[in-house]
Amino acid sequence: MPRGGHNKKPASLRIFEGNPGHRGIPAEVAAQVKAPPRPKWLTGEARKMWNEIVPELLNLGLVAKIDKGTLAGLCELWGEFVHIGELMEANKHDTEESRKLSARRRQVFHEYRIAAAEFGLSPSARARLAPDTLTGSSGKSVDEFAAMKGL
């Protein structure tokens, strides 16, 4: 069942923002920052995407071994997006087929954007990240972040 409202902000982000509501910051479950193994079934553009983004996400401390499924789904969506683009190019003279492919491509890209935001893979998602995270210093606990902010 879907839940309503906005996604919950991570504790580290609330601390970096200064906790403007002055409400308590609950503890979170922290996963070990470690690159998940690439699924063997990823091929083509999906595999290229995995190889490009996993090192970056690892450097930023934004990926854990348990993220394998979500990350694989993200890469698979990208592969499908690229494949549909190639099909559109091949069928550009078939108006009905192009229309169907275009609608499917928009839908896939929408799904991709939602999944990508989970990993900070858009300018607006990165804007919400802490400055220390962007330099690659990862693995700080909520207590370490709080100590840095004097909370």
Image: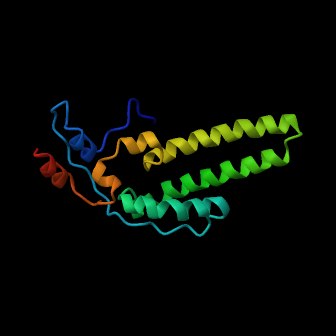
Residue 59: image quadrant is bottom left
**Furthest residue to the left?**
150
Residue at the (60%, 63%) spot, across then down: 48
Identified at 31% across, 40% down, the residue is: 9
Q: Is residue 78 above or below residue 52?
A: above
Instruction: Describe the colour scheme in one phrase.
Output: rainbow
Give the left or right position of residue 12, taking residue 108 as reference.
left
Residue toward you, 135 or 11:
135
Q: Position of residue 99 (x, y in %)?
A: 79, 34
The answer to whether residue 34 is above or below residue 19 is below
Q: Report the number of discs.
A: 0
Left or right of 98 in this view: 21:
left
Find residue 4 and report its horizontal and vertical position in percent.
40, 30
Question: Is the C terminus in the top left, top right, bottom left or bottom right quadrant?
Answer: top left
Q: Point out residue 76 in the picture as x, y percentages from the top left corner.
A: 60, 55
Q: Position of residue 61 (x, y in %)?
A: 35, 59
Horizontally, is 106 left or right of 114 in the view?
Answer: right
Looking at the image, which residue is at 40% across and 59% down? 63
Left or right, residue 85 beside residue 24: right
138 up-or-down from 7: above or below = below
Occupied quadrant, residue 108: top right
Q: Which residue is rendered at x = 61% and y = 59% of the image?
A: 46
